[in-house]
Amino acid sequence: MSVSAVSTRPLAGQVGWLRSAAFDLNLIVVVALVALTAGAVALGQPHLFGVVLILDLWLLGYHHVVSTFTRLCFDRASFREHRFLVVQLPIIVIAATLAAVYLLGVWVLPTTYLYWQWFHYTRQSYGIERMYRRKAPAGTVIHDYLTTRALYLLPLFGILHRSWQQPARFLGMEVKYLPMSDVGVWLVGGLAGFAVAAWAVVSLRAAWRGELALAHFLYTASHHLIFLTGYWLIDNITTGWLVLNVWHNLQYILFVWWYNNKRFGDQIDPQARLLSTLSQKEHVVGYLCVCVGIATLLFGGLQVLSQTYTFSDAVSVALVVSMVLNFHHYVVDGIIWKRKKAPLPSPA
């Protein structure tokens, strides 16, 4: 195992922020605190779980999906480039989702969502960790091998732990799990624990020598804390998911605004006047209001659908639409952040 370093000369006072101390501390610390607070409220005041869930879906969940569309169709050039993702792909996802429900049953929706969101959340976090890796100042030391394995092994242990627990319902719906033995889940758990502990030791040694990439360390530590809390420390699968979901949504919203801001800089692009204007730092509140406004229309529409239309006693149109939005978002994110011409690294 080799230690990856930018150089061997430590430089004091450089931490490797993506944008600034204020932005990055919001992305790393505040986002994690909001997610943990949501989980604490849901655990401590179970009667408030529904309120917290509605706020998460309305203000963060659908907002985070809308943020994706700011990259796809908020200007003509982006729409032309991503026409397939905006027009044809939703039809394909709808057809596949309906076919799966018809052939397998309603359980396929929450089951697919459970495992796909685990992968999606992990990949997004890995992408952000890589950005902090690239921003690590000269003279800081990062053990890439340990960092990557710890980052993946802990979420893997988490989803395998849920599969081993096999809670009867997830998000109030029947769900099926991959078979998992006691030995298998605790073997992965042991590997994850060893990897995280080794990463912590290497990081502490780097800090002692003045070679710690502080921003990278803080982000990676927040990743471990959130996944450990969401998948293991909180026994209830839905409450644990809430912590992960709030963290992921807020993280993505901030990241996409930052991406758009980097794309346009301080300039208003005549070909993308709306998005470039909203992406200026002085218009961040306007950007959030536009996204929340669109998300509110989407959320309200789904509530109407859920009370009006059902395919059967168990399947509402709103449930299918909500899952289609998530599945489409996962596919789109797996494409747009990996295209070679993208000027910034991927979060997912």
Image (spheres, grey):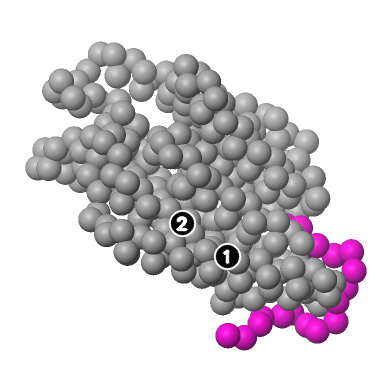
Residue 246 in the image: state x and y as whole percent.
Answer: 53, 37
Task: Classify residue 202 by image quadrant.
Answer: bottom right
Which quadrant does the N terminus fall into?
bottom right
Closer to the eye: label 2 or 1: 1
Helix, strand or loop at label 2? It is helix
Marks 2,1: beta carbons within 8 A: no
List the residue tagged with mark 1.
Answer: 196
Other-residue count near label 2 (Cα within 10 Å), few / some / many at <14 / 14–19 / ≥20: many
Alpha carbon of mark 2 to alpha carbon of mark 1: how far?
Answer: 11 Å
Residue displayed at 70% across by 61% down? 217
Work out which residue is located at the far right of the displayed protein and give it. 12
Of the numbered discs 2 and 1, the one sitting upstream in the chain is 2
Is there any visible trace of residue 291 in the rendered image?
no
Magenta stretch: helix, strand or loop mostly: loop
List the residue tagged with mark 2.
Answer: 155
Asked if the magenta segment contains residue 10, the reply would be yes
Asked if the magenta segment contains residue 84, the reply would be no
Residue 31 in the image: state x and y as whole percent.
Answer: 64, 41
Helix, strand or loop at label 1? It is helix
Other-residue count near label 1 (Cα within 10 Å), few / some / many at <14 / 14–19 / ≥20: many
Work out which residue is located at the far left of the displayed protein and give it. 103
Is there any visible trace of residue 40 in the rendered image?
yes
Label for residue 10?
none
Residue 52 in the image: state x and y as whole percent.
Answer: 51, 24
Which range of residues does the magenta coloring cover?
1-18
Specify the amino acid type for callout 2.
Answer: Pro
**Where 300 falls versus 156 (above or below)?**
above
Task: Classify residue 204 by image quadrant.
Answer: bottom right
Specify the amino acid type for callout 1.
Answer: Val
Residue displayed at 51% across by 55% down? 124
